[in-house]
Image (tube, grey):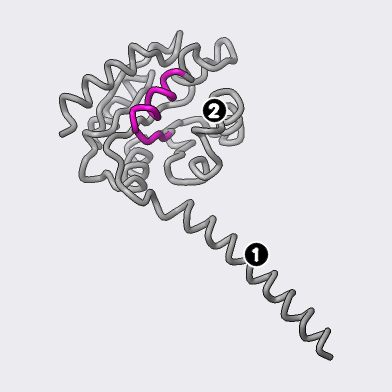
Amino acid sequence: MVTRTLRSCCCRLSLFDSLARVFLVVVLAFSGSDASPDRLCISDFDETLWIRATNSVAEEARRVVRACVRSGYEIAIATVNPFPLHVRRVLQEEISERWFTTELLVSPAFQFGRRNKTVAMNNILRYYGMLDRPECAVLFDDNKLANKPHADATGVLWVHVDERIGITMDDFDQAERKLDRFCP
């Protein structure tokens, strides 16, 4: 009888422990960052980080993401691409799992399949607690006609990326100049 109660209790604790861990992951994924970041790099995926014509990561994509992170900026993705598994695989395996963590890629910082990037950027800004400071975020995107109006609508700064070569360090330098000018 004592063994049965002990076993039953251990099973309940084990189940409770498992449920508690799942709850913690869900809370962390959807609660947003603990502190509001000073600045934020938001990147498109196709023709910005990933070049479809060559089926490869843009030559300077890793350097730009590293520059954002080393400058203390948070990172986020806003892409129309409707294939999140492909996007996640490329971000983690070909750019950096250290920066594109599973936690980041299951959070609202990862917006995919949305043609309306106004909604995507507002979700990202809300997640990072930056709705009142959109001028401290920059969107790197290749599609000026379709997506610059969304950046303008949210107040997020815009840097145009050449879709033939993808994101470059020159794009990052331009973003930093804009952030220095408009982000207090």
Q: Which mark is residue 96?
A: 2
Which element carries disc 1, helix, strand or loop?
helix
Name above or below for residue 64 compared with residue 37: above
> Residue at image x 50%, y 14%?
58
First to last magenta residue range: 63-76
Quarter-of-image position of residue 134: top left
When the figure is inspected, residue 150 is found, relative to residue 108, above or below; the finding is above
Give the quarter of the figure containing the C terminus.
Answer: top left
Residue 105: x %, y % from top left: 51, 40
Q: Which mark is residue 184?
A: none
Residue nearest the observer in this picture, 48 or 178: 178
The image quadrant that residue 125 belongs to is: top left
Of helix, strand and loop, which one carries label 2?
helix
Spatial separation of the CA atoms under disc 2 and disc 1: 29 Å
**In the drawing, does residue 5 fall left or right of residue 33?**
right
Where is the N terminus found, in terms of image quarters?
A: bottom right
Which residue is pictured at 76% across the width and 80% down the height? 8
Dot placed on the residue nearer the N-terminal end, 2 or 1 = 1
Indicate the amino acid at tag 2.
Ser
Q: Where in the figure is residue 44, as x and y percent of width and height?
A: 42, 26
Within-10-Å neighbours for mark 2: few <14, some 14–19, many 20+ = some
Q: In x, y percent, where is residue 183?
A: 18, 32
Q: Is residue 107 above or below residue 96?
A: below
Residue holding disc 1: 18
